[in-house]
Image (cartoon, grey):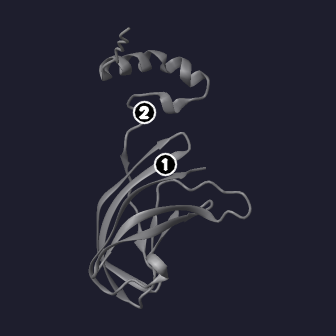
Amino acid sequence: MTLRFAFPVFAEARKTLLAWAPFMRRVGNPALYIGAEYVFQDWDPTLSAGTMTLADVQIFIARYVQVGKMVHISFYATFTTGGVATNTVFFTVPKSARAQSPGVDGQYAIVQITQAAGPELGTLKIAAGSDIVTGFRPGGVNWTLGANRLIVGNFFYEAN
């Protein structure tokens, strides 16, 4: 006995999902809607670093999309560091994070950061109820002062 399966091409699957969309939205599942409602948008983040100064800030990518309460961020920024070195860089996001349960201090992600020695993985944290992300170097080590520092990545977080 030979089993044969037929898989729909993307256009057929999209057509079917679009036909189902009005019914799916009534049951509270807007993430299944496929259309122009969920497209990436630009936002204008502000970067800062506490005691460290940031100069020559260039933001190449600052885009987000929100599906329900889930926000997906794509970003790419370069800058020059000066002043008194610190281990954190801050930037704003377009939507505030969800206020969490007691004992939970925020949402985390791993991203690439670049220092004079080359790329490394850093940690991002968005505090509960905040619209500011903190980017940490691995092990709590300070950023080195100089040009061509970079922070780039993609991450998800839950919004209010």
Give how far across and how far down residue 17 sits, in percent. Answer: 43, 20
User: Can residue 131 be seen in the rendering of this structure?
Assistant: no
| Left or right: 66 as drawn, with respect to 147 | right
- Kind of residue at badge 1: Val
The residue drawn where x is 45% and y is 76% is 138
Outermost front residue: 1
Q: Quick one: quadrant of the N terminus? A: top left
Residue position marked by numbered label 2 in the rendering: 37
**Badge 2 local density, few (<14 within 10 Å), some, or many (20+)?**
few
User: Can residue 58 be seen in the rendering of this structure?
Assistant: yes
- Kind of residue at badge 2: Glu
The residue drawn where x is 43% and y is 85% is 142
Label 2, label 1: how far apart the Cα atoms are: 14 Å
Give how far across and how far down residue 146 sits, in percent. Answer: 28, 85
Nearer to me, 36 or 137: 137
- Secondary structure beneath disc 1? strand
